[in-house]
Image (tube, rainbow, N blue to C red):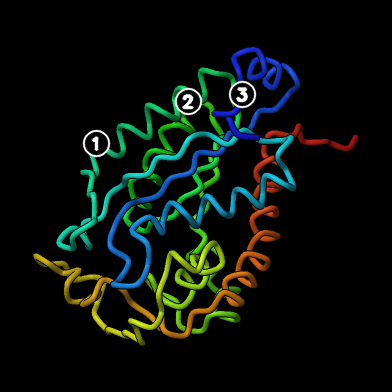
Amino acid sequence: MYMMDLSLRQFEDVLKSGVDTAILPIGMVEAHGPHCSLGTDVLIPREFLRRLDRIIGEKVVIGAEISYGHSWALQSFKGTIDVSVEAFSNYVFEVGKEFHRSGFKNLVFFNGHGGNINSLNTVGEKLADLGLTILMINWWVDYRDTIKTIAAEPGHAGEDETSLVLAISESLADTSQVGNHQIELSPKIKYRNWGRSIFPEGYLGNAGAATVEKGEKLYQAMIPLMLKDFEDMWKVNKPVQTQI
């Protein structure tokens, strides 16, 4: 269920019913090549959660999206709205604290953007110290092996991301403009405008091979894996049964 659709009384009733899990969708508005929506990192988590809501909607409260994150690598591209690590981390921590204060035991960071990961790891640890159980989902990292069985050449606005966007709406991506970018640069080395080297047109991977059909297959393949992660999180708060 979606938090923004609930009234105060309805929200109170949900908490009284025992729902103790909140999901915080986190994305980014940034360049995704010349072909994909600037909102790709928001739109994909939104679609995953729309599908998950059909299955576990009575067990979770889906919060409002955090749409701006940190994107050092792509800040030189127009359309990238970059927030500093400090501002982003502090904001997510404050939001997380409020979910905890409201009575939730579990908080899921449903993240759509790679530049957010380091901050979210640190924030997750701080919130765990307050008593929350944190699950962080970074779909393109967590389920990469599965992704590559469907989209063999994934990457930023590459075959996987572009396919997922096309499956939402074909108006959000135009693969006629792109091909295959495979740049081999060490992630250990950073320098000014590094992102312009690794993402020369704002994307990486075989975006030209993306299709609606692949996008739908990706959604269908990853949803069960996400449900498994939720089940694992819920097991953490279950009392351990000891045998005498």
Camera-nearest residue between 115 and 176: 176
Q: Mark 1: give few (<14), some (14-19) or many (20+) Cα within 10 Å.
A: few
Residue type at mark 2 is Leu
In the structure shown, which secondary structural element does the residue marked by tag 1 occupy?
Answer: helix
Q: Give x and y (percent) for residue 20.
A: 66, 28
Residue type at mark 3 is Leu
The nearer-to-camera label among 2 and 1 is 1
Tell me what residue is drawn at x 72 percent, y 43 percent.
56
C-alpha separation, residue under disc 2 versus residue under disc 1:
20 Å
Residue highlighted by disc 2: 130
Question: Based on the displayed image, in which of its 4 quarters is residue 155 positioned?
Answer: bottom left
Q: Could you tell whether 4 is left or right of 35 in the image?
A: right
Q: Mark 2: give few (<14), some (14-19) or many (20+) Cα within 10 Å.
A: few
In the structure shown, which secondary structural element does the residue marked by tag 2 occupy?
Answer: helix
Q: Give x and y (percent) for residue 132.
A: 54, 30
The nearer-to-camera label among 3 and 2 is 3
Name the image quarter holding the C terminus: top right
